[in-house]
Image (spheres, helix red, strand yellow):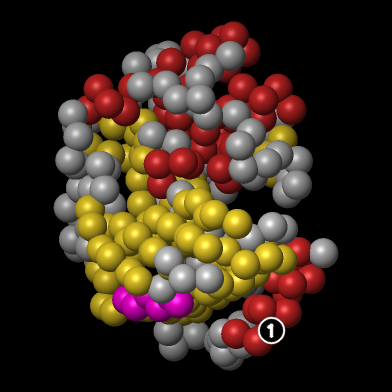
Amino acid sequence: MRLNIQHQTQYVYSEMVTYTIQQLRLTPQNGFGQHVRRWDIKVNGQLHEFNDTYGNIAHTIVIDNPHQELYISVSGEVETGVGDLNQHQTLPMPIYLRETELTEPSEGIIAFANQFKQQPIEDMMLALRDKMEYIKGATQVDTTASQAFALEQGVCQDHAHVFISCCRTLGYPARYVSGYLFTEDGSLMQTHAWVDVWLDNRWQSLDISNGSRTNETHIRLAVGLDYRGASPVSGMRIGGGEEGMVSSVIVNQQGGPNLQQQKVSSSSMLQQAQQAQQ
């Protein structure tokens, strides 16, 4: 399957920003059944590429002159379902047993996970999906696994954090994966998240929110111990006052019907970000 991706992010600020530094993990790599045919990142600042601790291709944006906007545009084509099954691994496996602030297990998570000690990993995935309803707005970007599990609600990020916490409780190395998901009806026009679990001497990838193993509809961008380690965009700024941000993701299958013929215009993105600021 050949998938075209357009991902735009627009920030606007109520006051002048004197300095911005952002880290982007928005570049896919070959392997895990995908092949990157082309990829391009455009920003209104200096862009520096490097490989981070987890082996992700990352970029740093630096803007050291006064500004009131930050625009990030990513586009490319990725072929999925290919024979390249190389699995990137740069760190010792015990690293992925470490708990983080976002994945530390509660007593409830530990009790839940222990029910599945001798069962297939899919059983725990399906049970967790049934227990935690997918509801947008129920949680925030900094909601922990314990909080989301107690709420029994969340989005893909929360499902991933809780499942990682369960896996590590059982002694399975696990990591957070950020990426994109193609849907026929275009129902998920945003970034997505799932989990890699180390079983049988290889990474096995499970999409908790959809209750399935990953397949050719998934495009992986980055991995980390949790969302913060694999976040597509993170950083800091000096100044700026109130921030407005809007993001647009379009994933289309080449040769299939285009759900959206063209990407959202930059002027429309700016207008939406200004509205979000208010």
The three-letter amino acid code for the residue at tag 1 is Ser
Residue 113 appears in view: yes
Q: Look at the magenta stretch and give its main secondary structure.
A: strand
> Does the magenta segment cover residue 207?
no
Q: Nearer the viewer, residue 107 or 120?
A: 107
Quick check: 70 left or right of 175?
A: right
Quarter of the figure with residue 149: top right
- At a point 32% along the width and 40% down the height, the residue shown is 204
The residue indicated by pointer 1 is 268
Spot occupied by residue 88 in the image (x, y as percentages of width and height): 20, 48
Q: Secondary structure at mark 1?
A: helix
Tell me if mark 1 has few (under 14), some (14-19) or many (20+) residues whose alpha carbon lies within 10 angstroms of its own.
few
Quick check: 202 left or right of 252?
A: left
- In the rendered view of the protein, which quadrant contains the N terminus? bottom left
Residue 79 appears in view: no
- At a point 62% along the width and 13% down the height, the residue shown is 108
Spot occupied by residue 246 in the image (x, y as percentages of width and height): 65, 67
Q: Is residue 258 above or below residue 143?
A: below
- At a point 49% along the width and 11% down the height, the residue shown is 114
Q: Is residue 127 above or below residue 188?
A: above
Q: Which residues are magenta?
A: 39-44
Quarter of the figure with residue 21: bottom left
